[in-house]
Image (tube, rainbow, N blue to C red):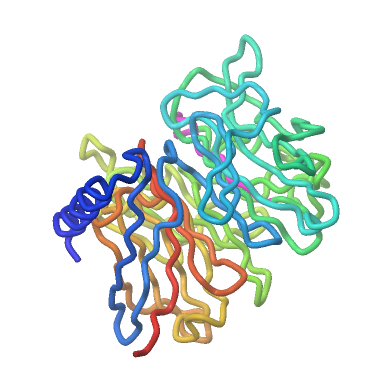
Amino acid sequence: MTATYSLKMRLSLAAIIAAAGLPAAQPVLAQEKIQAGDVAINVQPIAGNLENPWSVEVLPDGAYIVTEKPGRIRIIRDGKTSEALTGLPEIRVAGQGGLLDIALAPDFAETRTLYFTAAAVAGEGGHGTAVFSARLSKDESGLENVQQIFVMNKLTGTGQHFGSRIAIAADGSLYFGIGDRGEMDRAQDPDDHAGSILHIKPDGTPGDGNPFVVNGKGAAEIWSVGHRNPQGITIDPSDNRLYTVEHGARGGDEINSPNAGSNYGWPMISYGKHYSGAEIGVGQAADGYEQPLHYWDPSIAPGAIAVYRGAMFPEWNGDFLVAALKYQLLARIDRAEDGSIGTEERLLTGDYGRIRDVKVAPDGSILLVTDEEDGQLIRLSRADAS
């Protein structure tokens, strides 16, 4: 389905609903069916009227909790979207900054603990990426016991490259990324949190296994360096391997699997060029810098990554799913059993807008949010064979 046809279909449905006398404010959530190879997929918008949604998670009872970049968290249950939750801290909403990712603690069902990242205002030095813990109130009206457990160690006034999705390991520790904040050389400074993957415990102290905890040759929270703007991060539940997806400049978007103490090259090596057209660093490879598992040129502007492990689409077991902003698509990257990268299939191109997040739900369906002023939460499920 083309973007133009999809828009016409939605407008036609809106006219029908208006003629039937239904409230004009009701969002039009039209399901469509698409084909991905031999797999038929239902594309079902679950909720609309979300302002630049950034992240989605599934609550234990099947409801959805969604962040909106301007600084709101909402819960979507049985087709109804809640009022914004109370209790959020002051958040800097400017440029690419705002309320960003949300993740549920492994014991959320018992403790109601969650984590979120945001561009936080932190004094005269400016603002930067911070991580918060909180507890969802029993009546789901707000957040309680909100604590800032981490804030990056060099604050500036720039409005780009905050990162910063969260992946929670089996031991409850948090991995997350922070971009270079628009100052690319910071990504090669091991004492600077910018341009890094970081690893902390739930209380904000450095995670076990971090490379600089013992030798003191860098910031204790850093896991790996040389990242331009890692907006996607996930842990493969089958083997607990960490994966990230990050924005390049003009080309050079990358998928990496960060190892402790490794350097992923930005801005010394890249498969892209500067926006001016100038070359970046010393080329595409050099000693001491890791190569990506996969890269895009031209860029697709990746917003999130997931590894598909679910029962609904067994053909996709182990494949990467990457949300893309630039071409408004979901990329499925085939992987063999040994992890080697195969072909890429592009879904939904241009039909729903900029896709910011992708998550695999407990039932194996795939959840997306669209980064638009009138954004949506969308569910992909297997269509009936008949």
Q: Is residue 288 visible?
A: no
Check the image and report above or below for 112 versus 84.
below
Residue with the most extreme top position: 124
The residue that appears at 58% across and 45% down in the rendered structure is: 177
Q: Tell which of 353 and 176 is nearer to you.
A: 353
Instruction: Indicate left or right for 8 with 300 as reference.
Output: left
Percent of width and height locating residue 95: 41, 26
Q: Is residue 90 visible?
A: yes
Percent of width and height locating residue 139: 75, 42
Q: Is residue 176 magenta?
A: yes
Residue with the most extreme bottom position: 386
Query: What range of the chain is rendered magenta?
Result: 175-185
Label count reads: 0
Q: Tell which of 130 and 74 is nearer to you.
A: 74
Q: Is residue 143 magenta?
A: no
- Look at the image and tell me in which quarter the N terminus lies: bottom left
The residue that appears at 37% across and 53% down in the rendered structure is: 253
Percent of width and height locating residue 27: 36, 46
Percent of width and height locating residue 265: 47, 50
Q: Tell which of 363 and 138 is nearer to you.
A: 138
Question: Can you tell which quarter of the image residue 254 is in?
Answer: bottom left
Check the image and report above or below for 373 versus 210.
above
Residue with the most extreme front position: 21
